Image (spheres, rainbow, N blue to C red):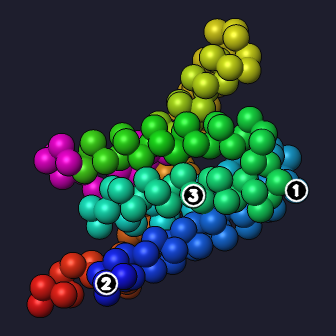
């Protein structure tokens, strides 16, 4: 295996480990809260960081891996929560990526907030389709949208601060230099 491949695999492992650990810790913390479905989404700081570094494929792999591994670690892998998390995370990731490649120069806070809202909308759509086949679930969208805006702002601020302190190094750029 060449040096570039080794470095990329290490990056995937590193970001997946961090995202999974945060996901798992957050899943433990929310069990004691009165609203166990309400998560800040701190593991998504890693995903947003990777997207801001234009690493869409790595962000997608890490997003799916953290949900699956986090589901294994928290013993919720076979629960609807994992499927909802996968759908929400994937929808949010695609929306954030589209914002970033649109050329409209969205801020990290805007990207994060839209991603969080999209995450919640995707989950409501999936709940409506698979779990509660009643249109009344759509009444949750305004509340979850507001929560998504707040949580997205928190995630965006944390990611912004991390980006000020961390440097992402692409192994391809290192070998070319």
On screen, 31 above or below 88?
below
Number of other residues with Cα within 10 Å of mark 2, as a class: few under 14, some 14 to 19, many 20 or more = few
Number of other residues with Cα within 10 Å of mark 3, as a class: few under 14, some 14 to 19, many 20 or more = many
The label nearer to you, 2 versus 3, is 2
Which residue in the protein does label 2 denote?
2
Asked if disc 3 and disc 1 are in contact, CB closer than 8 Å, the reply is: no
- The picture quadrant where one finds residue 2 is bottom left
Left/right placement of residue 166 relative to residue 124 reads: left
- The picture quadrant where one finds residue 92 is top left
Q: SS at mark 2?
A: loop
Write the residue at 68% across / 20% down: 130
Write the residue at 27% across / 44% down: 99
Q: x, y (%) of residue 146?
A: 55, 38
Residue stretch in magenta: 101-117
Q: x, y (%) of residue 87?
A: 55, 37
Q: Is residue 91 visible?
A: yes
Tell me which numbered mark, 1 or 2, is placed earlier along the sequence: 2
Residue at the farthest front position: 1
Asked if disc 2 and disc 3 are in contact, CB closer than 8 Å, the reply is: no
Alpha carbon distance from label 2 to label 3: 24 Å
Q: Is residue 158 visible?
A: no
In which quadrant is the C terminus drawn? bottom left
Whether residue 110 appears in magenta in the rendering, the answer is: yes
Which residue in the protein does label 3 denote?
65
Write the residue at 60% across / 32% down: 123
Q: SS at mark 3?
A: helix
Write the residue at 63% across / 65% down: 20
Alpha carbon distance from label 3 to label 1: 25 Å
On screen, 11 above or below 3?
above
Number of other residues with Cα within 10 Å of mark 1, as a class: few under 14, some 14 to 19, many 20 or more = few
Which residue in the protein does label 1 denote?
32
């Amino acid at each position: 295996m060449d040096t570039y491949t080794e470095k990329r695999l290490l990056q995937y492992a590193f970001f997946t480990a961090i995202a999974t650990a945060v996901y798992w810790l957050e899943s433990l913390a929310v069990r004691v809260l009165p609203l166990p479905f309400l998560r800040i989404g701190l593991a998504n700081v890693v995903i947003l960081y990777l997207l801001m570094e234009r690493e869409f494929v790595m962000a997608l792999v890490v997003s799916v891996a953290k949900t699956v591994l986090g589901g294994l670690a928290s013993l919720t892998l076979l629960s609807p929560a994992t499927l909802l998390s996968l759908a929400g995370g994937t929808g949010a990731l695609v929306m954030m990526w589209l914002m970033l490649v649109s050329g409209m120069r969205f801020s990290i806070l805007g990207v994060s907030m839209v991603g969080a809202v999209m995450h919640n909308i995707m989950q409501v759509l999936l709940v409506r389709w698979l779990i509660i086949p009643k249109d009344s679930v759509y009444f949750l969208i305004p509340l979850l949208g507001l929560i998504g805006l707040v949580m997205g702002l928190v995630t965006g601020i944390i990611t912004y601060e991390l980006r000020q302190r961390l440097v992402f190094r692409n192994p391809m750029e290192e070998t070319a230099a």
